[in-house]
Amino acid sequence: MNDLKIDTVIVLDGDPFVVQTTQHVQMGRGGAILRTKLKNLISGNVLEKTFKSGDKIEAAELSRTKANFLYKEGSNFNFMDNQSFEQFVLPQDQIGEISHYVKEGSDVEILNFKEKPVTVNLPPKVELKVASAPPGVRGNTAQGNVTKPAILETGHTVQVPLFVEIGDLVRINTETGEYVERA
C-alpha cells in the first residue's frame, strides 16, 4: 500500500491503470486504508478504489518506445513507430488531455502494455505557435496578472499574458495546461 503513489501504473482485472490521486485514511481502531482514483489506460474510464494494508497490487510491466505523431482524423490520432515504421491509431479518450498539446510531426513517447500501445507521454513542456489571439488591451491592469485567451496551432485555447501575439512561440506546461513563457 505504501508503494502506491501518483503516476504509478498497476494491473487491475487484467487492465493497466494509472494512479491519479491517493488519500491515506487512518480509521480509529481499525487499520489504515488508501483511497485512490485510478484511470484505465485502455478505455480512459476513471475508477475509485479503496485498498487495505494487506492487499496485494501488481505493478504493470510497461515498455516505452518512440513514435512520431502523423495526423488527427476525427477523434483518432495516427502515429508511426520510429523503429519498426508501423502505423497505429490511438483514440482521443485513451490519450486524454495530452491530445491538446501534440502537433503534427512531433516525436512522443508511447507506453506499451503487453506489446500494445496504450497511451502517450509528452515532455513536461512543449512549444506551440499561437494561431489566434485578440489584441492586448491595456486597461484595468492593477491586479498585475492580466491574461487573454489565445488559440494554439493545435486548436486548444489557453490563457496567455497581454503581450503574446499571433505567430509567437509559447511554452505550455503539459501537466497543468498553463502558459509558462514565450519561447
Image (spheres, rainbow, N blue to C red):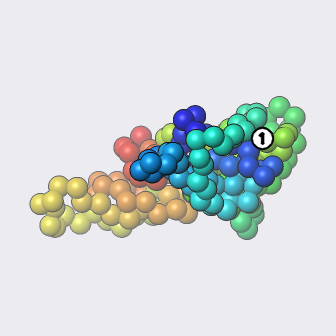
What residue sits 69% from the left and 55% below the top? 40
Residue placed most toward the observer, 31 or 21: 31
Q: Is residue 36 visible?
A: yes
Q: Is residue 66 visible?
A: no
Question: Can you give x and y, in whole percent of width and height, for residue 36 in the image?
Answer: 55, 52
Say which residue label 1 marks. 112
Residue 132, above or below 40: below
What residue sits 58% from the left and 34% below the top? 3
Q: Quadrant of residue 86?
A: top right
Residue placed most toward the observer, 60 or 149: 60
Question: Can you give x and y, in whole percent of width and height, for residue 102 in the image?
Answer: 61, 50
What residue sits 47% from the left and 63% below the top? 157
Which kind of residue does numbered mark 1 sit on?
A: Asn
At label 1, counting other C-alpha atoms closer than 10 Å, the crowd grade (few under 14, some 14-19, many 20 or more) is some
Quadrant in which the C terminus is drawn: top left
What residue sits 73% from the left and 68% below the top? 74
Does dot 1 land on a helix, a strand or a loop?
Answer: strand
Question: Can you give x and y, in whole percent of width and height, for residue 155 in the image?
Answer: 55, 63
The outermost residue toward the front is 29
